[in-house]
Amino acid sequence: MTVAALIVKVLNLERIGVKIIGPVPAGPPPLRLPHLPSTLVPSVLAEAAGVTLISFSSMMLTARSFASKNRYDISLDRVCRSSVSLLGIENANE
């Protein structure tokens, strides 16, 4: 990148029509809620439910696989609590 910028500057490529973008803002963009038309809300919620179901199923299959390999039982309640803990939302109701 630095070499390319140096070449553009030294050869004055902007003069012959090469467009440059100028200064680029540093850091990530500010956080904000995305604009979502109300007509898309049902579709987004349905897709989010599908992703949640697939993620939960994958987690349970992985847990059962480890339990089978290491000869121990798993508890659905315990797996759910640990996944909630991993998401960092365990104390959301306090």
Image (cartoon, rainbow, N blue to C red):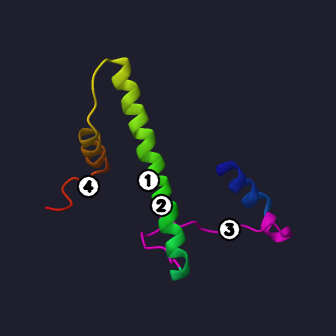
* Element carrying mark 1: helix
Q: Which residues are magenta?
A: 13-36
Quadrant, the C terminus = bottom left
Question: x%, y% of residue 3?
Answer: 69, 49
Residue type of the residue flagged with mark 1? Thr
Question: x%, y% of residue 80?
Answer: 29, 45
User: Which mark is drawn over residue 21?
Assistant: 3
User: Which mark is drawn over residue 48?
Assistant: 2
Question: x%, y% of residue 71?
Answer: 31, 18
Residue type of the residue flagged with mark 3? Ile
* Element carrying mark 3: loop
Front: mark 3 or 1: 1
Sequence-first disc among 3 and 2: 3
Location of residue 81 with respect to 14 vertically, above or below: above
State the residue position of label 4: 89
> Disc 3 versus disc 4: distance between alpha carbons?
42 Å
* Residue 47 horizontal side relative to residue 85, left or right: right
| The magenta stretch spans residue 20 | yes
Sequence-first disc among 3 and 1: 3
Front: mark 2 or 4: 2
Q: Main secondary structure of the magenta part?
A: loop
Badge 1: how crowded within 10 Å, few (<14), some, or many (20+)?
few
* Element carrying mark 2: helix
Sequence-first disc among 3 and 4: 3
Question: x%, y% of residue 15?
Answer: 82, 70
